[in-house]
Image (cartoon, rainbow, N blue to C red):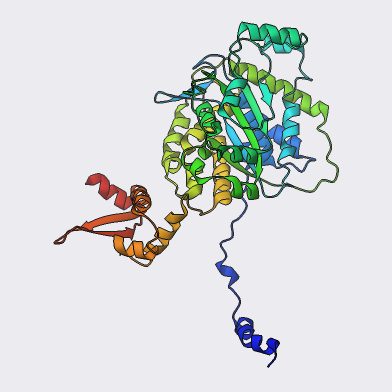
Amino acid sequence: MSGASRGLPRILPLIGAPPDDPGDLALKEWPRFSFDACPGFLGDFVRLATRDSEADPAAICITTLVRFAAEVYGYAPSQGPHIYVGETVHPARLFAVLCGNTSKARKGTSRHPVTKLFSREHCQPADLEAWGLPLPARESGGPLSTGEGLAHHVRDESDEERERRKRQNPSEPLREKGDMRLIIIDEEFASCLVCIKREGNTVSMGIRCFWDSGDYAPLTKNNPVVVRGAHICIITHITIQELAVCLGDVQAVNGFGNRFLWICVRRSKLVALPSRMPDNELAPLQRELWRLVGLAQKRHAMTMTAPALDLWKAIYPELSQEHTGLAGSVINRAEAQTLRLALIYALLDGQGHIAEPHLQAALAMWRYAQDSALYIFGDRAVDPLEDKILEALKTGPLSATELSAALSRHVPRERLQPLLQQLEAQQRISITKIKNAGRPRVILALRELSEKSEEREGDA
């Protein structure tokens, strides 16, 4: 018998095997962006910027929001527009990641029309003076590499440094002291994620500090850069494929990921030769933008109107819902992100309070960001072991010994115990101890959480 004949019996069963059922594929639909997130002035600009362009409206919208947010903070702590949540101050400060489905997703195409809008070529000096506008926020193209690098760009310059800068660049106007605004538009977020994995790198800590409070004071011995009340906004780009390779789970868990709005971006249409935005249409939008910036910079603490507060109370349970998995770890800051968005929408409307339409627009933007995160990260667990535990418990309740056997007894107790406690705290499993003659027997089971079960626990 030839070699080919001897191999034939092993091939035949594969030929006769039924094909996989494509109905079992867990396919996800690309998130749908709603123009409810683009009211008024913002919608006029997004439509203009995308009318004869391949740019994604969602990318134009979020880039404009982040860029506007960078301009509108005051020069001292708790000054400029902000909203209180208890004693926590939330300013108009946003970080966003544009995630393209491919390198041709036209992530960068969203930058250029927004940059054009935020220039001042159509604004008269007299108007800028009447609106009380300082210089625009500093700009940096990144890349994000260290926390100290971020702090260096927004530090208070000494008088000597200011004098040196004036001598070196006599034509460049000096910024007011205390101007700590910075907009970072970084098109290589993958390089930031690589830096984060290096031992001792501080960019993750820096990003968290600058999103939370604007304060950065590392406990380093040699020449620490201490910053108070900085106002940094970040817009950065990456492909979904790069993200899958680079993003470390630990960074998502410790809060790095949920400081960002994750936005799915793709080419909106094919335009062989996009046209520039007509000056006669852009000019009035640009003048209106800087008028709104001037108004916003003079705002202080802002509150919600009564209808907005009623809506906030109605949606708060939805926003406060605990999400699981890796996607959950990057969207579990929904309340804070939505409030900051609502604050920015109010400022874009020239208002000194957050009204119901502003909150509705913020919800539309947040829901797109949430759907984007669920699309990008899917059902992937923060810890791969979590998936294995839940899969094992789908067969029914198991004792701790039986679960260890199901995991091939390869997981040490020090690794398994905190993860089981976390799953129990998230109310995804139940842990029951059954008394017997010796050590209590621990039984683990999947748990289906319902409103009724929560009510029973509350009554207990």
Given residues 44 and 15, the one toward you in this image is 15
Q: Is residue 333 above or below residue 442?
A: above
Q: Nearer the viewer, residue 65 or 332?
A: 332
Q: Is residue 128 left or right of residue 146?
A: right
Residue 219 percent across, percent down from the top left? 46, 23
Q: Is residue 397 visible?
A: no
Quadrant containing the N terminus in the rendered view: bottom right
Q: Quadrant of residue 130?
A: top right
Q: Is residue 261 left or right of residue 255?
A: right
How many numbered circles are shown?
0
Residue lying furthest bottom in this view? 1
> Is 15 positioned to the left or the right of 227 in the image?
right
- Where on the picture, by quarter, is residue 385? bottom left
- Of residues 369 and 191, the one nearer the viewer is 191
Judge whether 161 appears above or below 426 on screen. Answer: above
Splitting the image into 4 quarters, where does residue 71 fall?
Answer: top right
**Given the current orientation, which residue lies at the most extreme left position?**
437
Residue name at image x 31 percent, y 48 percent = 454
Residue 246 image position (x, y, % from top left): 60, 46
Residue 9 visible to an observer of this rendering: yes
Q: What residue is drawn where x is 76% and y is 8%?
A: 170
Q: Residue 83, how many percent across, how many down? A: 48, 24
Residue at the limit of the structure toward the right, as seen here: 273
Where residue 264 appears, as percent x and y from the top left, is 63, 45
**Above or below for 419 versus 229:** below
